[in-house]
Image: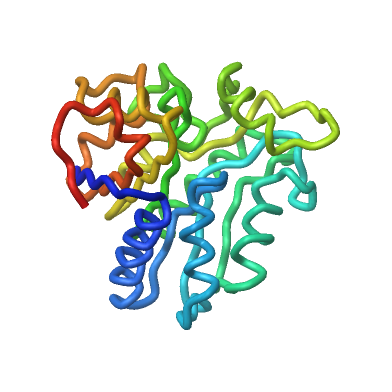
Amino acid sequence: MHVKVFKTKSEASDYAFQLLIKQKDLGPSTYGLATGSTPLGLYQLMVNSEYDFSQDQAINLDEYIGLSKDHPQSYAYFMNQYLFSKKPFKATYIPNGVAEEIHQECLNYDQILEQWPIDLQILGLGSNGHIGFNEPGSSFDTKTHCVQLTESTIKDNQRFFENNEKVPSRAITMGIDSILKAKQIILMAFGENKAHAIRQAIELPASPLCPASCLQQHANTFILLDEEAASQLSGEYNA
């Protein structure tokens, strides 16, 4: 695990972009992608770049159960709005949140992950330490599964929903075991509200109580932080 602290989230996003381009220079790749505000800086850099992603695959971490791909708050809609419509990929995969058989959808997604092993996985971090939608208490050996979202996660995501629309309470998420199979992982976390989870993930023993702490087991992981997210760390970490 490599921990790097930057003055701003923009600098951290720039560094993540350089890591992504190093992977791209190796040839057609499969990228694991995240949603939420954290990776938006990285996605904008991808959009503004000269790089062509039309020979690459993209596999997203998760999707809300009950939201179709054309729902404005679905993660499929998010990815199309901020990245895929501007930088087309050869193929993109996002769990189907309105699948009739959710269990079967999870099994199908695991088959996709087996067919297209992830070269570089992008992660954000929940304020409670979740990655993907793997909430505290999630086993480190889980594969794609349905999860009941915690109240803190629902509260964190309320800002994305307009007109007092209720945030979905369940989601399909790539499991921790699936995430750890990526050849390289980049986790970005910005803001003081992530500081407690970052300390748990980096400086305390790995535990399912902080799902992100599983990354201690992955040698090729980069943790990219702004100064606020790193504010509770006791060690010295520099970009």
Residue beneath the point at 21% across and 21% down: 204
Residue beneath the point at 49% across and 46% down: 38
Residue beneath the point at 35% across and 65% down: 20
Residue projecting furthest to the front: 7
Is 13 on the left-hand or right-hand side of 75? left
Residue projecting furthest to the left: 236
Q: Position of residue 139 (x, y in %)?
A: 37, 23
Q: Position of residue 68 (x, y in %)?
A: 77, 45
Q: Position of residue 234 (x, y in %)?
A: 18, 26
Asked whether residue 109 appears in the rendered view, the answer is no
Residue beneath the point at 51% across and 32% down: 133
Q: Specify the color scheme.
A: rainbow
Q: Where's the N terminus, which quadrant?
A: top left
Is 47 above or below relative to 118?
A: below
Asked whether residue 138 appears in the rendered view, the answer is yes
Is 136 above or below relative to 113?
A: above
